[in-house]
Amino acid sequence: MTVLTRVIARLLLPSTLITAIAVLVKGYGDVGDGFSAAVIAAFGVLLQYVAFGHRAAARALPLRAMPAVSFAGLLLALLVTFGPVLRGQAPLAHSPAPGADVIYLGTLELHTALVFDLGVFLLVFGFAVGAIDLIAGATDRERGQGPL
Amino acid sequence: MLVLPLAIVWLAAVPLALLDGRRRWVGWLAVAALGAGFLAMLRLAVAVFARGPVELVAGGWPAEVGITLRADALGVTFAVLSIGVLLAALAYETLGGVHERALPALVLFLATGLTGLFLTGDAFNFYVFFEIAMTSSFVLAGYGRRTRELRAALIFTVVNLLGSTLFLSGIAALYHVTGTLDMRGIATWAGVADQNSVLLIATIIFVAFGIKVGLFPFHFWLPPVYRDTWPAVAAILSGALANIGSYGLIRFGADLLPRELRFAAPALLILGAASVLYGALQAVAVRTASEALAYSAISNAGYILIALGIGGPAGYAAAILFAVVNSLNKTVLFLAAGLRGWLVSAAFAIGAFSVAGVPPSAGFFGKAALFRGGIAPDDPALSVALVALLFVGGALAFVYMFQIYQRDFWEREGAGQTSGIGSRILVLGLAGLVVAFGVWPEPLLAVSQQAAGVLNGGRP
């Protein structure tokens, strides 16, 4: 890989992550959700693997935490799903309820659906990064370089 | 109440996934969680049978807008059965010692998928839970991690992914034709849609579920998988996961697309008969117990198809009854085939009698219901053919079951290590359940009739 590729890959990472966050938070008024946000973010990570190779990219990432990130995301999403049941509402009922006023943070609308999507984001992102690392590591092992 | 069984197993599965399942207390924790889910499901089932279907729309949205969760008699019957089988298999594996850290969590994720798909009123949601169940079972099939298990897991995964893709295409096509994913909406609109396109869709969905349950022309993957997986996993695949196929055939066929099912009845009868005979003849020919049981599963799937082909309230009730009994039989047999010791051979013999349809086992009433449904007063030739088929199938089942019994439990008497007393008592308890249903079949018959009564095509 040329220096140019590496520089661009490095530069693209923050902008990919910001796009992912935008897709995540805009989900309810616009196109987007936690799943596609996580896929976009994982794509940014994949770019690092392509540009810098498995070893360098894996060293820079907290890979050991990825299973925990996935399961934390799943747990978060499930709590939002089943939490309302404890209050006697239907599962996946969100507050503020549809039609009610939401709290604004700038143009960002805060409601529990966002937390649900954050859970989905963490689940998919954790899984995707883990899978990318596994596949990248497999080609390394095939070439006889061995695991890290 | 409807979400409680789902919430218990799903929420328990997540923390368990991070724990080491090889530790005994983790295994028992998983058994306790699954047991709690099973009890919650039983409570739901009792309520459904006493007071009719329970319904709930996710997110508190109005019906037709939100995604519906619906528990009716058919769904809860299969849910109680499948979670019960999973509970038995997990307790069995915990008693014998778990080899892999992920097993308890995987069984709970599988329970989540099964609970969800039996309790949903939405075709796409059905697909989502179906995939949760399938994904966990792909990993489960490789349990044991020796070459033979991994090879079995690869076959299982590739073939069933193909089935899932077909099913997803079928759902998408149904949505295109009917404009809804709600099952009740599909049942309403598919009846007035263009018959040719609905028939094509019905065929796709039939093939998808045929692959799952292992019907004759789509059975090719099943024998190597059931032969090479771990006994508890084979019990899970044939006792719990195959229920998706039979439930899917009954729900999508008899409930959502009854017009197409009636139209295809002759084809179903022919395929069912082919499945019964092919499976039984192969089972007589093979040498190992698990392989014979796998072919027996193909043969028994044929009976369900025949019952669906007969149709009407009696036929659908027979299909449900047979599916329930068959799943219990297979669980007992696969679990017993993995053990040694004197209580086990008794359990295996009971399972074998039940597959052959000998009283006083539950299998007798499965066959009896088929007889009753199969005697069509207006078509004597069909009645004769069906009764003859049932006799031949039963006789062959008798032959292959006792071949296994003779080879594995008589000849090798005393050979090999006796298994732990706990797992032997568990298997004998399950076999006792098969006998109990055979001695006192009224509850099971009532359940199957009430479950058939919720089907659009099953109302008298």
Image (cartoon, coloured by chain):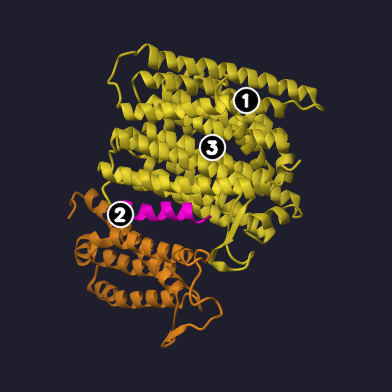
Chain colours: A orange, B yellow
Instruction: Tell which of B151 and B258 is nearer to you.
Output: B258
Relative horizontal placement of residue B338, taking residue A66 as reference (left or right): right
Residue type at mark 1? Lys
Write the start and end of the magenta stretch as one range: B1-16
Q: Is residue B14 visible?
A: yes
Residue position marked by numbered label 1 in the rendering: B367
* Quadrant that contains the C terminus of chain B: top right
Q: Are marks 1 and 2 on the same chain?
A: no
Residue B213 bears which disc, if any? 3
Q: Specify few, some or many for label 2: CA neighbours under 10 Å numbering under 14, 14-19, or 20 or more.
A: few
Labels 1 and 3 within one chain? yes
Residue B13 part of the magenta-drawn span: yes
Reading the image, the residue beneath label 2 is A135
Q: Residue at x 46, y 45 (%)?
A: B38
Image location of residue B457, percent across then percent down: 72, 44
**Is there a contact, CB below 8 Å, between mark 2 and mark 3?**
no
Front position among marks 2 and 3 = 3
Q: How many marks?
A: 3
Whether marks 2 and 3 lie on the same chain: no
Compared to B219, does B76 lie above or below?
below
Could you classify mark 3 by the number of other residues whose Cα lies within 10 Å: few (under 14), some (14-19), or many (20 or more)? many
Q: Classify mark 1: helix, strand or loop.
A: helix
Q: Position of residue A64 (x, y in %)?
A: 23, 59
Where is residue B146, by image quadrant?
Answer: top left
Residue B113 percent across, percent down from the top left? 47, 50
